[in-house]
Amino acid sequence: MIHLDKFDKVTLKDISIYAYHGVLPEEKERGQEFRVNVELYTNFEGISQTDQLEQVIDYRQVLESIQKTATGTRFDLLEALAEHLALNLLQFDRVKRVKISVAKPRPPLPAVTGGVEVSVVRSCPD
């Protein structure tokens, strides 16, 4: 018998956070804007019958978790920040998988005009 996982997706786009992450001293002192995009994989099956917030992921709680984590802990690396955010979001009961991208729109790199971004994908163990 084939077992198929059902995944539905909630996306939060272009979350803007001002924080103090980076390797360079000026990044740690002055801070900068970070952009976060999140895809949360869950299961909406049956929601059309209940139509209750308690049956889905509350976007407000997700946003609060992202903001608290991104401003409450300092990281040198974008990769570390992204993974930390992803692991925190996996703590939500209904989140089965998360893809999170963290970008520095204006990194301190003179030749980079489009920003720098990292993405991680993490899943709950079966």
Image (tube, helix red, strand yellow):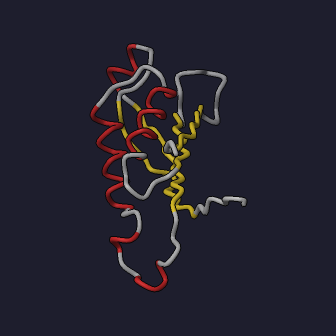
Q: What residue sits 56% from the left and 45% below the top?
A: 99
**1 or 37: nearer the viewer:** 1
Q: What residue sits 37% from the left and 52% below the top?
A: 92
- State which quadrant residue 28 falls in: top left
Q: What residue sits 40% from the left and 26% below the top?
A: 21
Q: Position of residue 42 (x, y in %)?
A: 51, 60
Q: Quadrant of the N terminus?
A: bottom right
Q: Position of residue 122 (x, y in %)?
A: 53, 40
**43 or 111: nearer the viewer:** 43
- State which quadrant residue 53 falls in: bottom left
Q: Position of residue 91 (x, y in %)?
A: 37, 46
Q: What residue sits 35% from the left and 33% below the top?
A: 19
Numbered label tally: 0
Q: Determine whether 89 is above or below 61 in the image.
A: above
Q: Is residue 33 left or right of residue 7?
A: left
Q: Position of residue 71 (x, y in %)?
A: 31, 36
Q: Residue furthest front?
A: 1
Q: Residue furthest right?
A: 1
Q: Determine whether 35 is above or below 40 in the image.
A: above
Q: Determine whether 82 is above or below 66 in the image.
A: above
